[in-house]
Image (cartoon, grey):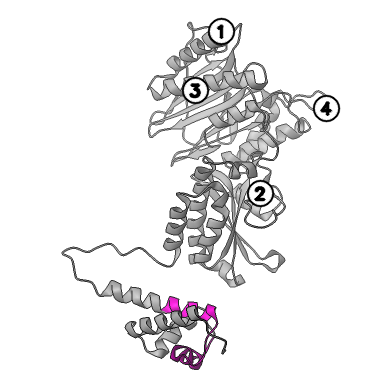
Amino acid sequence: MTRPVDGPAEERRALLRAAFGYADLTLEQLWLRYFELGGDADLFDLETHLDGLACLPDVDGDLLAVAVNERLDELSAARRVPFSRPLRPPRPTAGPLAALVQLLEAARTAPPDRLAPLAAKAGRALGVDVAVHVVDHEQRSLVRLPHGRACSEPIAVDGTLPGRVFQSGRLLPSEAGGVPRLWLPLLDGADRVGVLEVRTARARDLEDPTLREQCGWLAAMIAHLVVSLGLHGDAVERTRRGRPRSPSAELVWQQLPPLTAATDDFVLAGLLEPSADVGGDAFDYALGEDTVWMTVLDAMGHGLGAGLMTAATLATARSARRDGRGIHDQARAIDEVVAATFPGSAFVTGVLAELDVASGRLRYVRAGHPPPLLLRDGRVVKELSGSGRVPFGLATAGFAVAEEVLEPGDWLVLYTDGITEARDSAGRWFGEQRLVEFLTRAAAAGQPPPETVRRLVHAVLEHQDGVLQDDASILVASWAAR
């Protein structure tokens, strides 16, 4: 145990002896606290260290410092002049709340590049090692955020245990490779952004319900930071990109809401492809206490011109909606902006829908667009083919708002023609019938909307050998059964 003692080490030991004198602990009580923190020196070694006859390694000296400081915190909290009312407990210095507070405060001024090391530091406060894996925009791979080491290989979403966690939104344990791990979903609200890998010291820790709960809190905080910090820089976004984006795709993606959102009653999930080269397609939604709004758009043409038209249309619809105007006025506003801003016979097809939650009354405008599908009891029961007006931008009057009555448990599916018109090498359409069959199987299998959307878009891509000739978008709204 004995080793040379430098000046700073002797100074630290003197401070330790002085603090020990204030700590109101016996030597045996101090050793027990030190031992509970993981120290392995015996009582005699501890006594000789305090007496200056020998010197413990720095790691043991630090554990003694933690033990004494925790005791001093206890004493200072206990010896207070009483107030006339109870006060809230002081800021925690250890445990899960301390880890979350530390992470939240550090993230306030941190660039996105620092998210992975901050998450790792918070994990150490819980006694575990963590790594953050974000999903790519195509939702095919989970990619680890870099943290001072060579990047690991992406993990496939399909066919892997971490991928199953992403798909299901449920925690799963693993002892693969002899390494005990917990895999937890990273959910920002209802939006799936990746998975959290938590390595524990012992396999038996995987079944600890308290550790699972605490890691769930940490995963929720990290998911929120993935999204919020991702707005302030490019590090997270760069990790999530499987390939470069075209300017039109960059423009459209910046206008989209989160791919998934939910309330107690509704889940909405959308996706579009080709992720890196989309131009004319987009979707939007808004969830309110009494009303749910849904929008799907498809601008004519391709590339940046279509992207500009889509962005203008989306901004117009949002502006009118947020001003409290109904979908008839939203449609007229879109007509006016498209006709006035884009030359010639430019147009945008789309569906604007507005659901009153109390009555189930759905009001919608369908402008030159495929009719939405209504699923009830796991079957497609109707195409909403009302309000068959011309595309937006080609007329500003002379159309009606269609209505339908929905029930709790119904699914509403809005999509663009890139879904049904995808063709394989033999020229066969993906088609509406195949779409209906896919949705029916997904409902029968109990797949939630986000996973249904992901698998459907991948099925459309595979039908066309991975290369779409047109943008393909879908938005699914699920009304929870009561």
Residue 17 is left or right of residue 445, and the answer is left
Q: Amino acid at mark 3?
A: Ala
Front: mark 3 or 4:
3
Q: Amino acid at mark 4?
A: Ser
Task: Tell me which label, 2 or 1, sits earlier in the chain.
Answer: 2
Front: mark 1 or 3:
3
Q: Secondary structure at mark 4?
A: loop
Q: Secondary structure at mark 2?
A: strand
Residue for badge 4? 425
Task: Tell me which label, 1 or 4, sits earlier in the chain.
Answer: 1
Residue for badge 3? 315
Q: Amino acid at mark 1?
A: Leu
Q: Is residue 381 among the parts visible in the rendering?
A: no
Q: Amino acid at mark 2?
A: Val
Task: Tell me which label, 4 or 2, sits earlier in the chain.
Answer: 2
Front: mark 2 or 1:
2
From what the image shows, is residue 349 above or below residue 78? above
Q: Give the CA distance from mark 4 to mark 2.
A: 32 Å
Residue for badge 2? 143
Q: Indicate whether residue 439 is drawn in magenta.
A: no
Q: Position of residue 160 (x, y in %)?
A: 70, 53
Q: Give the CA distance from mark 2 to mark 3.
A: 32 Å
Q: Give the CA distance from mark 1 to mark 3.
A: 18 Å
Disc 2 vs disc 3: Cβ atoms closer than 8 Å?
no
Front: mark 4 or 2:
2
